[in-house]
Image: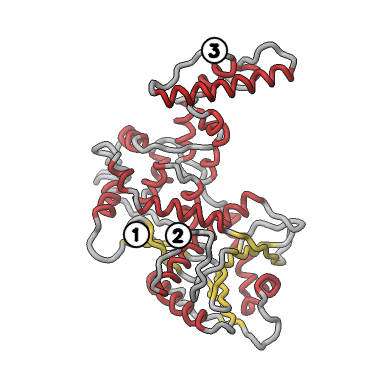
Amino acid sequence: MNVSTNVPLGGPAEPLAQRLAELRGPAPQRSLNARSLAALAANPGCHRRAVLDAAGVDKSVLAARLGRPAPFGQSPFAIARGLVFESRLKADDHAALLEPLRAHLGLPADDRAPLLVPDLLHRSGPAVRADRTAEALARAAADPDAWTLLDHPMLRLAVAGSTAYLEPDALVVHGGRCTVVEIKSFPVLDGSADPAKVGAAARQAAVYVLALQHAAAAAAGLPLTDDPYTEQRLPGSPRTSVLLVCPKDFGNQPTAVTVDVRRELATTRRQLSRMTGIGWLLAALPPGTDFDLAADEDGAPVRSTEQLTASVEAVPAAYSPDCLSTCELGFHCRARARCDDRVEQLGRGVRGELGSIRTVAEALAAASGAGFEVADDADGADGAHEAAERLAYAAALRAEALGTEALGPERLGVST
């Protein structure tokens, strides 16, 4: 299991942190974790999620208050299966985990290089555990010949005025460098796994790699390299290939696969750097905008559903169908996209192909050759006409291939 906690940075509250606290209200701050940071990086154009996550707003409660709760979150059966699988790997001094470590990381099979497993004070608070992890990582990196396994280390990552404490499943340290090890319960069947699940695991692991890169650079007194595809070979710095350990086929025998997370790391770095400059997003909010989910003395919500809806709609969203599986507000944003007839409901690919055409009705009109309204500015009009010409040409080619004379909405397979 991966957990995290957010705590304010030491010292007086900065203006940005104070503004984010005002948006959240007196409700408890929702902790950022690797899953939420990875989901945020997967949709970097969504201002709504960036603001809500930076403010620590509980989006599950917010979605319920808006009337569109999402059945979002990991299945309790999947959580239980993952805990059982991980406990079996780490039983008997990590005996089952050693085999994939030997196969993929080169851990010796004999006793000449025993695997060291330091105590990371798992019963302590996150700050103490993070300090202990930093000390253990520094000692392990200083001995290039030793093999060290950090079981559930605690990492720090500064995000938008607060410190997120992140907990990967394990780190293996050897030769002065470390490798992130993530244990997942989805199976590897005939040497391959579900690409969507592997992608989600890679995005999550990239957050841990980024936290380790920041820690290694800070310990060396150097800035983080500007190129996310370049590894800084510093003491304790992570490799950009992570090890996913999963059940083999339908049993509990572990197998492992090495995943290069440089692309996910680049996306995560870009989005988190954008979050640290979130001030301009806050400045664009209208006066009175907040997401206060607290209740008064009588138990009634302080903010009505209409007020919360207005605040949410004041922050632009970048909806796509993928949001339904990664964001608690996905069902609310989908409903708004449908009400407004926006093309975003058809997916990012369609949205990108249609250019300045914003609604499904405009797309159908363009495909059938009918006129439609475009933006007043010249650039918007030119883009809309260009997209309309491409769409009409594609529709004409399809009509010719189908042997039809016209291509109306009913032939596009879209209900009007």
Residue at the (56%, 35%) spot, across then down: 347
Q: Is residue 218 above or below residue 403?
A: below
Q: Identify residue type, mark 3.
A: Ala
Camera-side mark, 1 or 3: 3
Q: Residues within 10 Å of mark 2 (few under 14, many from 20)?
A: few
Which secondary structure, mark 3? loop
In the image as oriented, which residue stretches furthest toward the bottom?
A: 112
- 333 vs 162, left or right, is right
- 41 vs 94, left or right, is left
- 322 vs 405, left or right, is left
**Which residue in the protein does label 2 denote?**
226
Task: Report the front residue among 292 and 366.
Answer: 366
**Which residue in the protein does label 3 denote?**
370
**Alpha carbon of mark 2 to alpha carbon of mark 1: how far?**
22 Å
Q: Residues within 10 Å of mark 3 (few under 14, many from 20)?
A: few
Residue 300 shows in this picture: no
Q: Identify residue type, mark 1.
A: Ser
**Which residue in the protein does label 1 denote?**
162
